[in-house]
């Protein structure tokens, strides 16, 4: 089944100008030709050409659709197989009719991500580039898209291949010294091995330094808005989302459940959660909301703690400060349009030097300062350097950390005077771990798991 001809809808289902049904495989052109009528057969059409015609049901000769058909011949295609892309009208019925017609005439419905999987298996891209394709589709900000695009273009792959080549040369040299001492090969001394290992460690550390920022840009920052009831939490959510997603009233306890939204703040994607006001309450429904608020608080990577400028600081406010000790917190003193009653000096003391922003959400003031504080907290120094290779994928980060650990074990063994042939074991293991990032050494079960996360048609 791995290399039969597959087909799937490659555009989002729904009404639109066009829909695309894609085929890939040795029989893609022949299958499409069975259902196509135009000026010439698709098998006679030059590669990378789009032609106009109609689609028919071969059994009844009934015209099914009007279409533009792209003919792309191997190996210069995404999958390195023959590829056909049928551009038809974008309605759900139209696209499904074309897909069913293709399946009835010899194609098989593709599994999720199978086109990209074939591109990987056929050597068109490596595994990290394949994962970059999915990141590109899911990107929610320009920064996320740029990082994914660099990964698709192979920037990370080249870095990894450079490190693996350095390790491979080291291992090969050790093997030659051991097996063929009579040859005039460079003698692999402990000092020379240490130099090579130091270079690899340094490069891995550079990649891992980008991991926290890259992961945030890829997956979003889990951000929770907390505060007593009626301090302006829902207003803050609406201000950041630029839409009235949450109900705002003067009645305490309006928000009784968690509300989640994605928002782009200066290129930082936030998974923003507005919580029920944390307080003791007799209301059963509100109490459930408060418990959910406490739960999401434990999982948050950033806390936006909202206080009311027009109220005295309460014991509940102080309790919230204690609940978020040693966490990433930005304190927002809201309602600055009201007369100040809050003890701002005590707020600063409780906040322990973390960022503090004042806002009047009803007047739409202070939101830009808040956005800047969020960006500065996680990206001070910027995510702007175009020549930096960012690591954003959790799998890649874990493998880099393991690689760093094994090569450091090799360094420690060198310092202890362990024979070079034994040190080589850790060097080889590092080479294998780095290979898992780009897919040179990876299990089939992992491939199936990774590509199952892709959408159909990609």
Image: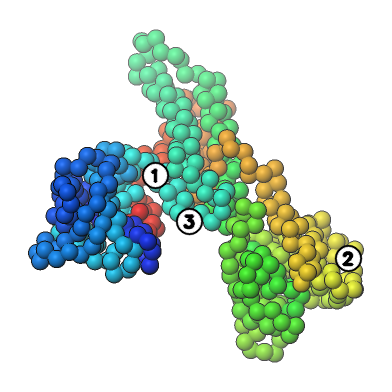
**Image quarter of residue 355:** bottom right
**Residue 79 screen position, x and y as percent:** 30, 44
Numbered disc 3: secondary structure? helix
Question: Which residue in the structure is indicated by mark 3?
Answer: 138
Of discs 3 and 1, which sits in the foreground? 3
Mark sitting on residue 127: 1
CA–CA distance in space, label 3 to label 1: 17 Å
Location of the C terminus by quadrant is: bottom left
State whether residue 251 appears in this view.
Answer: yes
Identified at 33% across, 39% down, the residue is 124
Q: Nearer the viewer, residue 349 or 379?
A: 379
**Residue 2 screen position, x and y as percent:** 23, 50
Residue 268 higher or lower than 101, as above or below: above
CA–CA distance in space, label 3 to label 2: 41 Å
Identified at 32% across, 68% down, the residue is 92
State whether residue 160 appears in this view.
Answer: no
Does the residue at mark 3 contact the one at mark 2 (Cβ under 8 Å)?
A: no
**Residue 155 screen position, x and y as percent:** 48, 37
Question: Which residue in the structure is indicated by mark 2?
Answer: 344
Q: Nearer the viewer, residue 56 or 95?
A: 56
Of discs 3 and 2, which sits in the foreground? 3
Specify which label sits upstream in the sequence, 3 or 1.
1
């Amino acid at each position: 089944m791995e290399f039969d001809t597959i087909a799937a809808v490659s555009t989002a289902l729904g009404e639109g100008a066009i829909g695309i049904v894609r085929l890939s495989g040795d029989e893609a052109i022949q299958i499409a030709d069975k259902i196509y009528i135009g000026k010439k057969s698709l098998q006679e059409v030059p590669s990378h050409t789009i032609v106009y015609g109609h689609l028919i049901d071969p059994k009844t000769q009934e015209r099914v659709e009007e279409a533009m058909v792209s003919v792309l011949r191997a190996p210069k295609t995404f999958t390195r197989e023959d590829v056909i892309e049928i551009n038809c009208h974008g309605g759900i019925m139209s696209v499904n009719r074309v897909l069913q017609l293709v399946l009835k005439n010899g194609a098989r419905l593709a599994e999720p991500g199978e086109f990209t999987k074939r591109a990987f298996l056929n050597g068109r891209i490596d595994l990290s580039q394949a994962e970059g394709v999915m990141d590109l589709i899911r990107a929610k900000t320009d920064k996320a898209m740029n990082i994914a695009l660099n990964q698709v273009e192979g920037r990370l792959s080249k870095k990894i291949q450079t490190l693996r080549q350095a390790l491979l040369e080291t291992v090969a040299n050790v093997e030659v010294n051991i097996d063929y001492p009579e040859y005039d090969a460079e003698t692999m001394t402990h000092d020379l091995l240490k130099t090579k290992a130091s270079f690899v460690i340094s490069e891995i550390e550079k990649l891992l330094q980008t991991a926290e920022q890259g992961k945030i840009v890829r997956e979003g920052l889990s951000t929770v808005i907390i505060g007593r009831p009626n301090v302006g939490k829902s207003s803050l959510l609406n201000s950041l989302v630029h839409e009235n997603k949450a109900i705002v009233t003067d009645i305490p306890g309006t928000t009784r459940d968690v509300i989640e939204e994605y928002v782009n703040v200066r290129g930082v994607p936030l998974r923003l959660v507005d919580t029920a006001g944390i307080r003791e309450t007799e209301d059963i429904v509100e109490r459930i909301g408060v418990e959910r608020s406490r739960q999401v608080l434990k999982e948050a990577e950033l806390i936006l703690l909202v206080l009311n400028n027009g109220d005295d600081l309460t014991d509940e406010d102080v309790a919230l400060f204690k609940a978020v000790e040693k966490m990433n917190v930005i304190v927002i003193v809201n309602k600055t349009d009201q007369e100040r009653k809050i003890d701002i000096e005590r707020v600063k003391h409780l906040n322990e030097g973390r960022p503090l922003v004042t806002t009047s959400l009803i007047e739409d003031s202070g939101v830009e300062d808040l956005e800047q504080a969020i960006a500065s907290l996680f990206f001070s120094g910027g995510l702007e350097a175009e020549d930096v290779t960012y690591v954003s994928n959790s799998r890649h980060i874990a493998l880099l950390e393991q690689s760093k650990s094994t090569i450091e074990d090799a360094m420690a063994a060198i310092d202890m005077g362990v024979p070079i042939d034994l040190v080589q074991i850790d060097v080889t293991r590092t080479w294998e771990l780095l290979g898992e990032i780009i897919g040179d050494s990876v299990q089939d079960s992992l491939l199936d798991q990774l590509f199952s996360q892709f959408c159909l048609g990609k």
